Amino acid sequence: MNINFELYKIFYEVATLGNITKASQRLMISQPAVTKQIKSLENQLGGELFIRTKRGVILTDNGKEIYNYVKQGMHCFESAELQFSNLKKLETGIVRIGISTTLCRIFLLKYLEKFHKEYPNIAIQVFTDPSKTMREMLKDGTIDILIAKDLDQEDDELNVTKLGELHQCFISSSVHYEELKNKTIPLKDLDNYPLLFPKSPSSTRKSLNDFCKNNNITLTSKIEIASANLLEDFVTIGLGIGLVTKEYSMKKIKNEKVFVIKTEPELPSISYSLMTLKNSYHSFGANRLIEMILEEVKKQD
């Protein structure tokens, strides 16, 4: 049985008000049209729903049974409309973001702080899986937004908007390997020192490996560390020279706890972008966060 929803809506109003005239006024349709639609619903269901009286209408026993179900349905629709309205007004919802811990700290935190102040009732989920994994998560709808270092090749399924660049460098403790301060050394000579690298499959590590391969340079790691914070700490206590993202380590560089080693050739910068799935629907919250990010990036151009 496939009964038009509008018939149930009219039935609900008539049953709730107990009066066809009042129902027609609320529904803003004529009284004869309401009567006709009620008759159509009764015919389709196969039984009378109302008893007509001089004062209005009252539900039959069968009508009361139907009314209880229709009432629940109408309340569900009203709740759905209210929820959608709240989502549209950014009073509820969720934003799911894929991003590396490095980019989150360097780039995204300031936007999350502003977004949360303006829309405190919107939940935020942050995923920090490997970039390749998060691209698949973006494609299957697990996340709404991906902020990551640029792809090795174009992906026709994704919208990609460049946000900025990160700079790789080697750092040393300010009280160790002082002979490397204030001078430029051949990059290949760093292989004579204990080197600390991010653990694969770090995109920073991959970028270094590709760069060294293209320049016929061999650099061998002494220690591999998954955590950027730990790598900095290991460098600070003199365990070796570390490969880092300069922007991430800027605080320790400015505080002169570590210094940047200048090399020839210099390590390449790495572009990073905001990625979304083409032809997909984004929540109101996700759209607003994207707008905030792109508005600020545009100001900086």
Image: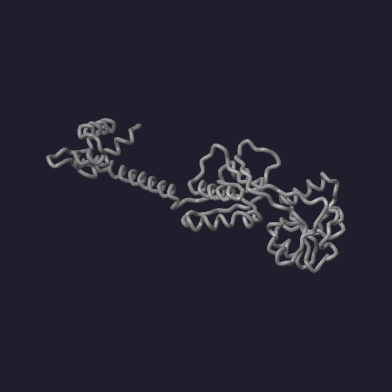
60 relative position to 274: left or right: left
Q: Residue 279 at x, y = what percent?
A: 54, 37
Q: Is residue 151 left or right of residue 289?
A: right
Percent x, y for residue 40?
Answer: 26, 31
Q: Quadrant of the N terminus?
A: top left
Which residue lies at the image location 71% right of the left edge and 67% below the top edge?
255
Residue occupying the far left of the picture: 54
Q: Is residue 101 above or below residue 73?
A: below
Q: Quadrant of residue 243?
A: bottom right
Identify which residue is drawn at 81% across, 48% down: 212
Q: Nearer the viewer, residue 177 or 7?
A: 177
Which of 224/190 is in front?
A: 190
Q: Position of residue 57 (x, y in %)?
A: 18, 40
Q: Quadrant of residue 41?
A: top left
The structure's colour scheme is one colour
Determine whether, in the image, residue 124 is placed left or right of residue 188. Answer: left
Q: Where does the image place residue 180, in percent across and percent down from the top left?
A: 84, 62
